[in-house]
Amino acid sequence: MNSPQMTNRNPVAIHKKNTFGLLVLIFLISITACSYSQVATPSADGAQIDQVGIMNVYFTDPDRQREGTLPSEALKDAFSQARESIDLAIYNFNDPVLARALIQAHKRGVIVRVVMEDENAGKSTPFSLQAAGIPLVAGNEDGLMHNKFAVIDGSTLWMGSTNFTTYGFYTDNNYFVEIDDPDIAHIYQVEFDEMF
C-alpha cells in the first residue's frame, strides 16, 4: 500500500509567513473590534444569528457549566454544510468527529486541503485524512506552523485558540470565532494558499 505524500516546505519562508499571519490577525482583531457592532453568542438553546458580516463566538466548556453550542459542534456543522471548499491550517489534529466531517465533505465533492505542523502531520488522524484523499502539506522544521483557522467556501473564516484535539476542545479553556465576511476570509485564504 502506498503511503500518502507529504510536502515539506522551506522553514524560513513559513516562519516569515507565520509572522505575517500574526500581524494580519492582530490587525483583523483590531478592525473587527471597531467595525462589528453585533457579536452573536449562542443562546441557551444554541441558536445562532445567521447574517453576513456577523461574528459567532464559541467557548469550550471543560467544567460543563455553559449552555449553547460548543466549538467542536459548530465546526462539525460548518464542515457538514460546506458546499465548495474547506481550507484548514491547524497545528495539531486528533479529534475523530471533525476528521470524519472533513472526510465526508471530501466525499461529497467539497475541495478539502490541510496545512499542518510537520511534527504532528504523521500522526493517525492526519494520516487518515490523507488516506481518504485529502491533500495535506506539512513543513516548518525551524519554527512552528501554529495557526488555527479554516476558510469555508471562500467566504467564512473560523479562527481561534484551540487545536483540533480532544484535549483542546474538552479539557482546555479555548475559543473559536466564526466570521461570515468574504473580505476577511479572503485575507486568510491568501495566507493559506501561500502555505499550501
Image (cartoon, grey):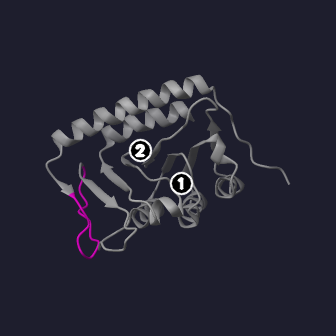
SS of the residue at dot 1? loop
Instruction: Name the magenta segment's main secondary structure.
Output: loop
Q: In this view, does 39 lie above or below 188?
A: below
Image mark count: 2
- In the image, taking residue 21 as reference, residue 167 lies left or right, namely right
Query: Residue 184 appears in which quarter of the rendering?
Result: top left
Q: Residues within 10 Å of mark 2 (few under 14, many from 20)?
A: many
Q: Which residue is labeled 1 in the image?
A: 110
| Residue type highlighted by circle 1 | Val
- The front one of 61 and 87 is 61
Q: Quadrant of the C terminus?
A: top right
Where does residue 194 sit, x and y in percent of width and height?
52, 30
Q: Is residue 104 above or below residue 176?
A: below
The stretch of residues the image draws in magenta is 40-52
For marks 1 and 2, give the CA distance.
12 Å
Where does residue 61 sit, x and y in percent of width and height?
37, 67
Q: Can residue 76 be seen in this view?
A: no
Q: Quadrant of the N terminus?
A: bottom right
- The front one of 65 and 131 is 65
- The front one of 63 and 107 is 63
SS of the residue at dot 2? loop
Q: Which residue is labeled 2 in the image?
A: 154
Q: Residue at x 39, y 64 (%)?
A: 74
Where does residue 186 sit, x and y in percent of width and height?
38, 37
Which disc number belongs to residue 145? none
Q: Can residue 109 be seen in this view?
A: yes
Looking at marks 1 and 2 on the same chain, the residue that comes earlier in the sequence is marked by 1
